[in-house]
Image: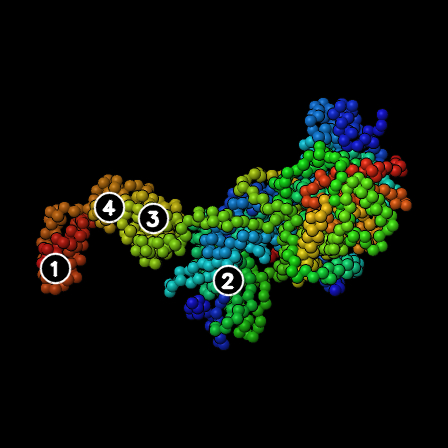
């Protein structure tokens, strides 16, 4: 399958002379979900007072030594399994040497030549089918602290709370070709890690950041152009803005016959532009070497298999199952599996309810509600149990879909039992044929002219009669029965 | 009664246990002698007042079950000691007061010992003469203007001059054994992973080991017992069954096979060293051990490999001294300037030299040619030892290629200084244990040491061999207190 | 191989140790004599030798994921040459 050519048309930059393709690779830094740091026993909790989660190891006091957190290793291996990647039974921690205020050791412990996880793949669902994005590697490393530049005009303040927190750096191959692919890729990665419980994916808290590699090449060229790396972009929107700016900048240079310099750039979110980080240039010689304070990390097949056993069903498998077992469309399945909490909610609802109706209600009303209130599904004001009850009430004819919407709105305020709401408000559907017949008769009597028109062939008027019946019954009439009775009476 | 300071560590322990002497008396004796010995410049920081208080506390509430009950001990200033200034011999740490204790010193205090003070050493343990210390040269009690060796020079000087009953040092390329050899004392570098590195200011992580420095082999066994422990805070600490080296001490070496490596007969080796070595060989033979000629073909590559690996690790280990978290800082107009000012003023010349070597060998394009190559050579050196240990139980060599030299004699030429460690460095590269014991004197009357190298975690064996040889050699200290 | 003054200056930059010209020249001499000595390793063919990865005869010990260190901010900041109540303080960094 030629992935590159498949969606070549999607994102390209056309100029007078040439049309350019944009080639994107991402280095995603995902914070490992763990209680304590990668090589020290301080807390990783977000939002603490500055420098209150800093141990002597994190602040690199003389003679302090790293001791690795087993759970972080397992988290990385699990993530590797989730990315269908090769798990390396032997990996090595290296020191990446550079000086920076928030890097207390003067080096970052990372993995260079021998990462814990090797090549893997992530599948993206594009409108015209699936696309596979290659994963180059995943490695474990320490996060740095935080430099705060805006408290004091003369000085920079350093907070080491983050120093030493475990990160997984997930490096993609340069397989991404459009801003939408970047969006889907990040979302998919986040989804997989949330399923696995290895990263909370919270971009506001910096749990997920990315370095973005961008290059451009003339459409049809096989060789990759010179790339620039945009450091530390912390939202999908900014990634897209940065890529768009950077790709256009590179194209401008090429159009004028210039050459791209390989460099590290920074995305200025205020000015919406990337600019060169020359300060980083001379520090580029990182002098990697194996950390002599640590030994190679080695594990057995048994260790990996044990972790494999406990890997939950991941989005791709779940999607397949939803399509096959529940007869969902790929589109519906995608929406329902993309987030683990959504899929859990869905499965809880359909345990006792009609699948088709449940799917519609979740992807329709519920999503609209959550969207409006800006809530995660885990914080949904309507529980899966109550939504399931509501759906059953529709299904068994107790209420109409229309009434159900009103009930849903009441539920959204206080997650009450739909049955109670219906009883209290008297919203139960009128399904007594005799009662309905009376209403139908009334409507027919009062609209003789329309009846004539209908009988002379204006079929569309049928809806009018239904509407009138519903109006009189305050929407409670069972629409199916009304239909049947009307059809009979209007013959 | 003999002077308290003339007693060995084991004698002191026995006396205190028998209540012949109090901790206060011992501590007072060492404090008094140390105070009279300022000329040696062995101490960087004294802890005398505190030590006397602790000695008092011990006497008021003695616990004779401990291995070092109420015994004052001064330690190399590379061990972090809680609330006591720790400098590593460097200006860059000259005001650093740790809030924590190294595992090795903690082990000493747990066994009843009392910190007497922090001893001078080469800056960050980089040196073979104690001349690189920011706190000045250390005089050897052996003779005026003579170096005590290094980097544990203050430790060796204080020990030989009887300013402390025993001491501890660290050994990255010979920093315990060479000064022990220069001062007529006993020094042991344990197997890599035997003593915890936690809380020891790091020089070269894959080579550094703490070890005992004592007046005789028996003391050495006792102190090693106390120092040595498995430590979960050091990932390179090895969880093997540690012996009770003191209890299992014996002097029978009958039937043991001792290897004599021909490669240690280096070009231009002095007659004196050769004679000393032969003396050692004869003693071993006389004691009923078998002497076996062996070959360690890659020995000559050890020193060059060491001068890649050690500086490389050091260049990275010393990156943390940047004026931000602790220690000396020299301001600058921006962050980089602050770093550069702090580090160029805070480090001495030898440390800078090694940081530069290390930075260079790790820098882009040179890694394979230097660091990787050196790690391969290290493997070959290790293989050499593994091979001969199929045939012998231990190896005997001289500890150093010469006796102590004058202060200033070699400090101008780094390479000639580095050559001092030619016999000790291969052992660090291979991670093996080795002990240096006094073997005799040269023409000038300066002590010379013999080195016994053991198999991994076979400290007991080399201690026993040393113990046996010690009796035969019957080395007598000729120190005349010239500085008092 | 020889190390020239430019290289010395480059390493001094990388290692954040400033050198005046005189010191740089002295270091150039020292480094060249040290590297002349190190070059001895070139005699040795190590093509098929696996490099040593660790000298410690053990496997990497793994730690449980437990928080054991508490807030020791005061202790951590105590030795800092420039700090305030909450932070380490360094000259302004402009990115």
Element under label 4? helix
Q: Position of residue A98 (x, y in %)?
A: 64, 55
Q: Crowding at label 1, few (<14), some or many (≥20) Cα neighbours within 10 Å?
A: some
Give the position of the C terminus of chain A as an image quadrant.
bottom left
- Kindly identify which numbered label has been placed on residue A347: 3
Q: For the residues carrying marks 4 and 3, which lies nearer the camera in this image? A: 3
- Pointer 1: what residue? A450
Q: For the residues carrying marks 2 and 4, which lies nearer the camera in this image? A: 2
- Find the distance from the CA under tag 2 to the CA under tag 4: 50 Å
- Pointer 4: what residue? A393
Q: Which badge, 3 or 1, comes first in the chain's sequence?
A: 3
In this rendering, would A266 be left or right of B74?
left
Which chain hosts label 3? A
- Find the distance from the CA under tag 2 to the CA under tag 1: 67 Å
Mark 1 near mark 4, Cβ–Cβ under 8 Å?
no
Q: Which badge, 1 or 4, comes first in the chain's sequence?
A: 4
Q: Can you say whether B387 is above or below B234 in the image?
A: below
Element under label 2? loop
- Kindly identify which numbered label has been placed on residue A173: 2
């Amino acid at each position: 399958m030629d992935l590159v050519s498949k969606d070549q048309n999607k994102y390209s930059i056309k100029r007078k002379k040439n049309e350019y393709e944009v080639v994107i690779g991402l280095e995603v830094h995902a914070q490992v979900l763990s209680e304590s740091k990668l090589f020290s026993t301080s807390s990783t909790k977000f939002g603490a007072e500055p420098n209150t989660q800093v141990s002597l190891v994190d602040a690199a006091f003389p003679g302090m030594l790293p001791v690795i957190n087993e759970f972080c290793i397992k988290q990385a291996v699990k993530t590797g399994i989730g990315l269908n990647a090769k798990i390396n039974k032997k990996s090595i921690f290296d020191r990446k040497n550079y000086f920076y205020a928030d890097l207390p050791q003067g080096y970052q412990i990372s993995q260079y030549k021998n990462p814990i996880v090797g090549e893997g793949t992530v599948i993206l669902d594009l409108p015209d089918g699936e696309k596979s994005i290659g994963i180059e590697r995943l490695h474990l490393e320490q996060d740095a602290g935080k430099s705060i530049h805006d408290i004091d005009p003369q000085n920079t303040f350093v907070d080491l709370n983050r120093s030493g927190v475990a990160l997984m750096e997930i490096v993609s191959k340069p397989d991404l070709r459009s801003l939408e692919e970047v969006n889907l890729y990040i979302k998919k990665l986040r989804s997989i890690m949330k399923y696995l419980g290895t990263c909370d994916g919270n971009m506001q808290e910096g749990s997920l950041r990315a370095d973005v590699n961008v290059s451009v090449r003339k459409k049809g060229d096989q060789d990759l152009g010179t790339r620039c790396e945009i450091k530390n972009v912390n939202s999908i929107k900014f990634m897209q803005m940065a890529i768009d700016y950077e790709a256009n900048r590179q194209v401008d240079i090429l159009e004028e016959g210039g050459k791209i310099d390989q460099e590290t750039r920074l995305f200025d979110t205020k000015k919406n532009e990337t600019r060169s980080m020359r300060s980083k240039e001379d520090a580029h010689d990182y002098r990697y070497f194996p950390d002599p304070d640590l030994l190679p990390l080695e594990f057995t097949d048994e260790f990996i298999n044990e972790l494999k056993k406990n890997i939950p069903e991941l989005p791709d498998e779940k999607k397949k199952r939803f399509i096959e077992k529940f007869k969902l469309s790929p589109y519906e399945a995608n929406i329902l599996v993309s987030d683990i909490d959504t899929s859990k909610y869905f499965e809880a609802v359909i345990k006792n309810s009609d699948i088709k109706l449940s799917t519609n209600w979740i992807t329709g009303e519920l999503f609209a509600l959550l969207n409006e209130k800006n809530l995660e599904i885990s914080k949904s004001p309507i529980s899966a149990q109550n939504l399931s009850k509501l759906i059953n009430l529709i299904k068994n004819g107790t209420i109409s879909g229309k009434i159900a919407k009103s009930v849903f709105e009441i539920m959204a305020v206080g997650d009450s039992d739909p049955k109670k709401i219906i009883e209290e408000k008297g919203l139960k559907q009128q399904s007594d044929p005799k009662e309905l017949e009376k209403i139908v008769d009334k409507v027919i009597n009062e609209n003789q002219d329309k009846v004539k028109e209908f009988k002379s062939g204006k079929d569309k008027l049928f809806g009018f009669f239904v509407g009138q019946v519903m109006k009189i019954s305050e929407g409670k009439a069972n629409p199916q029965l009304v239909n049947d009775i009307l059809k009979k009476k209007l013959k | 009664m003999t002077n308290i300071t003339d007693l060995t560590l084991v004698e002191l322990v026995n006396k205190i246990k028998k209540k012949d002497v109090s901790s206060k008396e011992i501590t007072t004796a060492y404090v008094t002698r140390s105070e009279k010995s300022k000329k040696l410049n062995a101490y960087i920081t004294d802890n005398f007042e505190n030590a006397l208080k602790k000695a008092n506390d011990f006497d008021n509430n003695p616990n004779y079950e401990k291995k070092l009950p109420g015994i004052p001990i001064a330690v190399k200033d590379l061990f972090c000691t809680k609330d006591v200034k720790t400098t590593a011999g460097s200006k860059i740490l000259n005001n650093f007061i740790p809030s924590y204790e190294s595992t090795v010193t903690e082990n000493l205090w747990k066994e009843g010992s009392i910190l007497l003070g922090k001893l001078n050493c080469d800056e960050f343990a980089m040196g073979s003469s104690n001349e690189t210390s920011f706190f000045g040269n250390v005089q050897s009690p052996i003779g005026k203007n003579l170096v005590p060796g290094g980097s544990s020079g203050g430790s060796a000087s204080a020990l030989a001059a009887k300013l402390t009953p025993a001491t501890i040092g660290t050994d990255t390329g010979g920093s315990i054994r060479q000064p022990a050899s220069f001062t007529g004392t006993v020094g042991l570098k344990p197997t890599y992973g035997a003593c915890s590195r936690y809380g020891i200011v790091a020089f070269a992580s894959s080579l550094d080991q703490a070890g005992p420095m004592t007046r005789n082999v028996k003391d050495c066994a006792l102190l090693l017992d106390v120092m040595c422990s498995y430590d979960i805070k050091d990932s390179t600490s090895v969880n093997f069954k540690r012996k009770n080296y003191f209890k299992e001490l014996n002097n029978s070496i009958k039937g043991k096979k001792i290897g004599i490596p021909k490669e240690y007969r280096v070009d231009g080796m002095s007659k004196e060293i050769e004679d000393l070595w032969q003396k050692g060989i004869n003693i071993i033979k006389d004691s009923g051990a078998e002497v076996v000629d062996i070959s360690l073909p890659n020995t000559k590559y050890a020193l060059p490999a060491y001068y890649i690996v050690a500086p490389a690790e050091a260049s990275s280990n010393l990156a943390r001294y940047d004026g931000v978290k602790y220690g000396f800082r020299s301001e600058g107009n921006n962050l980089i300037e602050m770093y550069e000012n702090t580090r160029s003023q805070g480090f001495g010349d030898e440390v800078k030299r090694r940081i530069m070597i290390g930075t260079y060998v790790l820098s882009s394009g040179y890694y394979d040619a230097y660091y990787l190559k050196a790690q391969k050579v290290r493997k070959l050196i290790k293989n050499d030892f593994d091979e001969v240990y199929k045939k012998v139980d231990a190896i005997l060599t001289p500890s150093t290629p010469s006796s102590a030299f004058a202060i200033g004699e070699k400090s101008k030429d780094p390479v000639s200084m580095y050559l001092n460690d030619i016999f000790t460095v291969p052992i660090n590269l291979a991670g093996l244990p080795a002990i240096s014991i006094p073997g005799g004197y040269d023409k000038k009357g300066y002590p010379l040491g013999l080195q016994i190298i053991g198999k991994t975690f076979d400290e007991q064996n080399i201690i026993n061999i040393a113990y046996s040889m010690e009796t035969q050699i019957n080395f007598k200290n000729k120190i005349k207190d010239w500085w008092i | 191989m020889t190390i020239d003054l430019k290289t010395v200056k480059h390493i001094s930059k990388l290692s954040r140790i400033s050198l005046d010209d005189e010191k740089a020249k002295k270091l150039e001499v020292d480094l060249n004599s040290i590297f002349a000595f190190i070059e001895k390793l070139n005699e040795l063919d190590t093509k098929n030798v696996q490099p040593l990865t660790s000298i410690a005869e053990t496997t990497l010990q793994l730690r449980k994921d437990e928080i054991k260190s508490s807030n020791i901010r005061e202790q951590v900041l105590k030795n800092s040459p420039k700090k305030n109540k909450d932070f380490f303080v360094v000259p302004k960094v402009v990115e």
